[in-house]
């Protein structure tokens, strides 16, 4: 659809309308695909008409209805015709109207109508007949005849030029609409790339560690500081690096990645800094390195902890001075690159061992991002599984599948050493093995997951183990009650501190305290009653009477 309102702001279109009005005393109207005039406001009393007949007809209700109905009928006939332009008699019979289509890919989007002009002298009988028609419609005959006499008569050369100008208006509208469509498509494509593929929303997770990560990324992305991303394999370090880049001021420039562990020292040297022709066997031409390829953009150095000490020195020089020298070269080259590094190794321990330079560590560790392992945010498992199920089922064009409760229990018991990458591969495997079955049971899980044993939780330095019989809900509630009770004692009834430890809101903790009867005063009262009963040789039972000790 054409944005007709925007056309009045296009300089070339406005200029063409002015020329047509001043030179040929004609008014240019834009009609949409339904024949409605889009550049005329009947309530605009300030508009001055260059065409005398428009100035006589449009300000009056009957004249306006007469002329606009003609335009609508013309548009309906015009839209069905194969011709791109029409010359026709006007509704009064003596004037000429020129119309030019606005089309895109063969689709009729509207028309430009120039009203009106006369060719040669107007026969008196036609003029009289038109005046009589207008008089019957309540128009002033004398004013109408005066307006008709002011019409400019065009010779053949002027008519040809007039038609070309009007057609040019429709061409400019088509060009404008085409460019706007291309721009919107480009914006939409970029939005999908920047906001969907690499937006923080694609880092699936609602757990507290992930919320803290999102908050950190919001602050980091707008800066130019060097970033070090640390985390286990498979946690999505490259996805985070891409998110930082595509939400930064450098987002329109290149994002270049290199895995430092994939090359030996010599190859990595050439890969990062480039080389000149003849610098070594096989260097048959100059080659630009990845640092130069990432100029004005971002270079992501994955597994930076696997660099040799020699390469670390060269990297430090680039970061400090912003210049590099290609392998075999003598001239320094200036670069402007933001570096994001990532590793799954303990760089501080490597510094102690002498395998990683301390000065480089502090240079790349301006901003540190710790990526939580999946085992530390298991509450995100359901939403991650739903995401990967939807993705895998869509790719394989099969109905959406569902993980059974028993299978989900096994998934929660497993520690996921391979993190998100391992989980995604497992979900894809389950979709394939389940065939046409809409539900995925525990028997389809990989043996390592199916046979996993749940690890014991820990808190306050003491391990807690539980043996429950009965329903899972009851067991979970008993565990929750025990954890809150022990936590309250450990934190000396500091609900804010305990709520933070448990990853819930303070209001949520208070509700659970009330639910399980863990109020401090109630527990103290129960303890006093128990002590009194013990001193008397019994324990109060549920009815307030003494019962036998277990």
Image: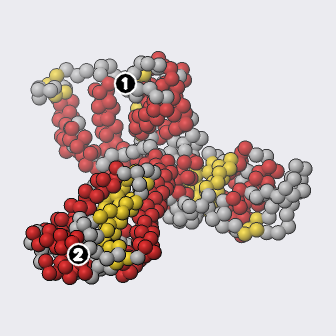
Q: Is residue 161 left or right of residue 2?
A: right
Q: Relative to 483, does residue 229 appear above or below in the rendering?
A: below
Q: Position of residue 448 (x, y in %)?
A: 54, 23
Report whether 360 appears left or right of 469. Answer: right
Nearest the eye: 476 or 519: 476
Question: In x, y percent, where is residue 245?
Answer: 55, 57
Front residue of 336 and 479: 336
Q: Answer whether residue 367 is visible to the viewer in this image.
A: no
Above or below, comparing residue 492 to residue 414 in the picture: below
User: Marks 2 and 1: which is nearer the front?
Assistant: 2
* Mark 2 Cα shell of 10 Å, populated few (<14), some (14-19), many (≥20): few
Label 1, secondary structure: give it: helix
Label 2 to label 1: alpha-carbon separation: 92 Å
As displayed, is residue 271 above or below residue 540? below
| Image quarter of the C terminus | top left
Residue 160: image quadrant is: bottom left
The numbered dot on residue 405 is 1
Q: Nearer the viewer, residue 414 or 257?
A: 257
Q: Residue at x 40, y 28 (%)?
A: 400
Q: Which residue is mark 2?
A: 124
397 horizontally vs 547: left or right: right
Residue 529 makes an appearance in the image: yes
| Percent coordinates x, y for residue 155 in the rendering | 41, 76
Residue 504 percent location from the top left of the image: 33, 46
Residue located 31% across and 44% down the image: 488
């Amino acid at each position: 659809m054409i944005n007709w309102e925007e056309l009045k702001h296009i300089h070339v279109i406005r200029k063409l309308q002015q020329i047509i009005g001043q030179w040929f005393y004609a008014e240019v109207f834009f009609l949409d695909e339904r024949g409605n005039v889009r550049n005329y406001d009947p309530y605009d009393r300030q508009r001055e008409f260059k065409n005398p007949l428009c100035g006589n007809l449009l300000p009056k209700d009957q004249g306006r209805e007469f002329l606009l109905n003609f335009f609508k009928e013309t548009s309906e006939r015009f839209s069905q015709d194969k011709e791109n332009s029409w010359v026709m008699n006007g509704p009064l019979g003596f004037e000429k109207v020129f119309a030019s289509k606005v089309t895109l890919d063969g689709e009729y989007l509207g028309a430009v109508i120039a009203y009106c002009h006369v060719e040669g002298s107007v026969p008196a009988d036609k003029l009289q007949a038109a005046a009589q028609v207008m008089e019957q419609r309540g128009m002033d005959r004398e004013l109408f005849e005066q307006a008709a006499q002011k019409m400019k008569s065009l010779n053949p050369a002027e008519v040809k030029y007039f038609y070309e100008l009007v057609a040019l208006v429709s061409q400019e509208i088509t060009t404008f609409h085409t460019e706007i469509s291309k721009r919107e498509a480009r914006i939409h494509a970029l939005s999908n790339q920047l906001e969907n593929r690499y937006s923080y929303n694609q880092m699936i997770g609602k757990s507290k560690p992930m919320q803290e990560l999102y908050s950190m990324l919001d602050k980091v992305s707008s800066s130019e500081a060097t970033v070090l991303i640390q985390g286990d394999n498979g946690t999505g370090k490259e996805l985070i690096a891409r998110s930082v880049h595509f939400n930064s001021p450098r987002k329109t420039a290149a994002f270049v990645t290199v895995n430092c562990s994939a090359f030996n020292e010599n190859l990595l040297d050439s890969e990062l800094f480039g080389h000149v022709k003849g610098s070594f066997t096989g260097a048959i031409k100059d080659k630009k390195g990845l640092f130069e390829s990432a100029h004005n953009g971002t270079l992501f150095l994955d597994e930076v902890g696997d660099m040799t000490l020699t390469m670390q020195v060269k990297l430090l020089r680039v970061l400090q001075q912003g210049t590099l020298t290609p392998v075999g070269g003598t001239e320094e080259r200036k670069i402007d690159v933001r570096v994001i590094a990532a590793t799954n190794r303990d760089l501080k321990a490597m510094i102690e061992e002498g395998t990683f330079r301390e000065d480089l560590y502090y240079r790349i560790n301006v901003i540190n991002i710790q990526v939580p392992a999946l085992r530390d945010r298991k509450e995100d498992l359901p939403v991650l599984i739903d995401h990967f199920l939807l993705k895998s089922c869509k790719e394989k064009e099969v109905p959406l599948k569902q993980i059974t409760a028993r299978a989900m229990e096994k998934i929660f018991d497993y520690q996921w050493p391979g993190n998100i990458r391992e989980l995604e591969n497992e979900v894809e495997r389950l979709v394939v093995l389940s065939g046409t079955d809409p539900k995925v049971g525990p028997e389809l899980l990989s043996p390592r997951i199916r046979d996993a044993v749940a690890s014991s939780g820990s808190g306050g330095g003491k391990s807690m183990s539980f043996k429950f019989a009965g329903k899972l809900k009851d067991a979970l509630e008993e565990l929750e009650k025990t954890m809150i009770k022990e936590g309250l004692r450990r934190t000396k009834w500091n609900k804010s501190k305990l709520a933070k430890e448990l990853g819930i809101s303070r209001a949520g903790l208070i509700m659970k305290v009330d639910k399980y009867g863990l109020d401090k005063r109630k527990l103290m009262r129960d303890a006093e009653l128990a002590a009194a009963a013990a001193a008397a040789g019994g324990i109060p039972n549920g009815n307030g009477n003494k019962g036998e000790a277990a």
